[in-house]
Amino acid sequence: MKFFIDTANLDEIREAAAMGVLDGVTTNPSLMAKVGVSNVTEHYRKICEAVDGDVSAEVISTDVDGMIKEGLELIKIHENITVKIPMIKDGVKAIKALASEGIKINCTLIFNPIQALVAAKAGAKYVSPFIGRLDDIGQDGMELIHDIRLIFDNYGMETQILAASVRHNQHLLSCAKAGADVVTMPFNVIESMIKHPLTDSGLAKFLADHKKSMG
Ligand code: G3P
């Protein structure tokens, strides 16, 4: 299972990468805007230099020619750039065209299993189901992961399930049980992965006991 970080914040990316268990990065236009990126190309280059793994860079065009043009520009930045394309009709056409040239695609804004199936058939390397946003509207985000896993396994599809819109480490645990290939997490969830109060209190007692026995 791969761990990606879902942010455009370079400090967070570098800190997560320093843990040694980070496999890639996902960004989106909202995350880029949040950190106030002015030079997008340079920012993606810095992200790629910070992490040894796929880095999703999202197109902002909504027509097929625009998406293809942007995708071809984005992949010039670094070999790890993965072009992130939304699940719309022109997006599917752009996925087909770019994937046919061997370009890595992450199809984003997936909210039902059929959308994932279409993206996989078009040749996407990753599909990004947004589990938190489904939970937000009273649906079961995890059911989507289970359904996509079942469908991809039925047909031996190699497209990877990249669980996105992850809000807490219970999402991560459920994704691991459901067989998601990748989970992309905000920095606070990355930090929460290693936390347990009994670990902290247990360590404090070990160190206190050691100090006592040493006099
Ligand atoms: O990067 C896409 C996705 O992870 C967004 O998450 O929290 O905005 O629903 P969120």
Image: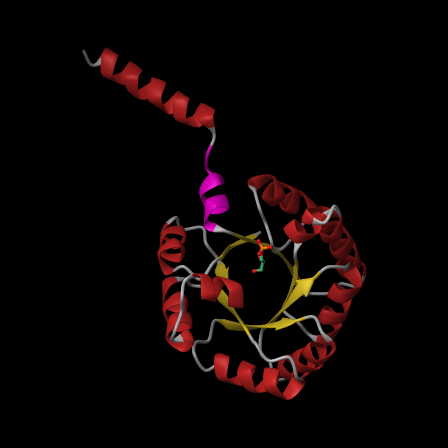
Question: Which of the 4 image quarters holds residue 161?
Answer: bottom right
Q: Residue 75: tell me if it is visible.
A: no
| Magenta region includes residue 168 | no
Q: Residue at x 37, y 75 (%)?
A: 42
* Count of numbered circles on the image: 0
Question: Which of the 4 image quarters holds residue 39?
Answer: bottom left
Q: Residue at x 37, y 24 (%)?
A: 203
Q: Residue 19: tell me if it is visible.
A: yes
Q: Residue at x 49, y 79 (%)?
A: 74
Q: Position of residue 14 (x, y in %)?
A: 36, 56
Q: Residue furthest left?
A: 215
Question: Which of the 4 image quarters holds residue 52?
Answer: bottom left
| Magenta region includes residue 192 | yes
Q: Position of residue 54 (x, y in %)?
A: 50, 66
Q: Main secondary structure of the magenta part?
A: helix
Q: Position of residue 75 (x, y in %)?
A: 49, 79
Q: Nearer the viewer, residue 59 or 75?
A: 59
Q: Is residue 1 left or right of residue 89?
A: left
Q: Quadrant of the C terminus?
A: top left
For the rendered model, the colour scheme is: secondary structure
Q: Position of residue 129 (x, y in %)?
A: 67, 58
Q: Splitting the image into four quadrants, where does ligand 1 fall?
A: bottom right
Question: On screen, 38 above or below 13?
Answer: below
Start and end of the magenta stretch? 187-195
